[in-house]
Image: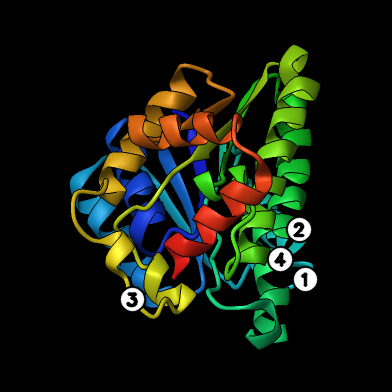
Amino acid sequence: MKTVLITGASSGIGRETALVFAEKGYHVVLTARRADLLESLKKEILQKHKVEVSIFPMDLAQNESAEQLFKKVQNQKLKIDVLINNAGFGLYGALLENDPKKIEQMMVLNMITLTQLSQLFGKEMVKNGQGNIVNIASTAAFQPIPNMAVYAATKAYVMNFSDALAYELKRKNVKVTCINPGATKSEFAQVAEFKSDAIFKGNIPSSRDLAEFIFTSMQKEKVNVIHGLKNAFMAWSIRFAPRIVTTHIAAKMME
């Protein structure tokens, strides 16, 4: 049986992804800040599925957290076949009004930790002769977004990094998949401190929908995929519009 490591697994997309992989027979290794939610998820998985569950409560928004997590996994002699870099958060508001510490933590979590985990576990996968790295970006990666300037930039980094890494590893039997979700029902809006969560209501995909899409995309060895036809069309159409126009439209949507 294979083992999957999922970051940001305590709620939302990460939690549902853990459940989907457990249903498919994967052993799961889970990490997130909230130990109580990880414990609850562990119990739920063990009650429903005959798989092994390991949890590592920690804050991946801190420098050197990637190396610390890697050492914890190595000490437990866990062989990771699939790494899902799901942990990340957004921050709403004009750059000059945002908390500098939160901006730094977002950049560390969304980019630096993701990069370091990809490198650390990627090396092990190459040694083992196989593996999958799945990075969760966003449709925000496709254009600048005023009032979420740093978040959108971090996701553009994730997408471009994933595409390049996929090319570097394609002959080493390690597959890299970048998932670009649009608005999804999760805790994202609350964490990002949106003034209104209207954009996250209505007929939008659930975290479960996205989790199943993540598993299917990985199985099909997709490199860069957008979740949802509407999101895919919007991302495609952006290529044909001047950036000043797409930036203006994004700004109006954020208002």
Q: What residue type is labelled 1?
A: Asn
N-term-proximal mark, 1 vs 4: 1
Asked where in the image residue 65 lies, by quadrant, the reply is bottom right
Q: Mark 1: few, some, or many residues within 10 Å (few <14, many ≥20)?
A: some
Q: Mark 3: few, some, or many residues within 10 Å (few <14, many ≥20)?
A: few
Q: Mark 1 points at which residue?
A: 63
Q: Are marks 2 and 4 in contact (CB under 8 Å)?
A: yes
Classify 176 as above or below 188. Answer: above
N-term-proximal mark, 3 vs 2: 2
Q: Do the residues labelled 1 and 4 touch (CB within 8 Å)?
A: no
Classify 18 as above or below 152. Answer: above
Q: What residue type is labelled 3?
A: Ser
N-term-proximal mark, 2 vs 4: 4
Q: Which amino acid does label 4 sit on?
A: Met
The alpha-carbon separation of the residues under discs 3 and 4 comes to 24 Å
Q: Do the residues labelled 2 and 1 touch (CB within 8 Å)?
A: yes
Q: Do the residues labelled 3 and 2 touch (CB within 8 Å)?
A: no
Q: Residue furthest top?
A: 171
The alpha-carbon separation of the residues under discs 3 and 1 comes to 31 Å
Q: Residue 107 carries which label?
A: 4
Q: Mark 2 points at which residue?
A: 112
Classify 57 as above or below 41. Answer: below
Q: Mark 2: few, some, or many residues within 10 Å (few <14, many ≥20)?
A: many
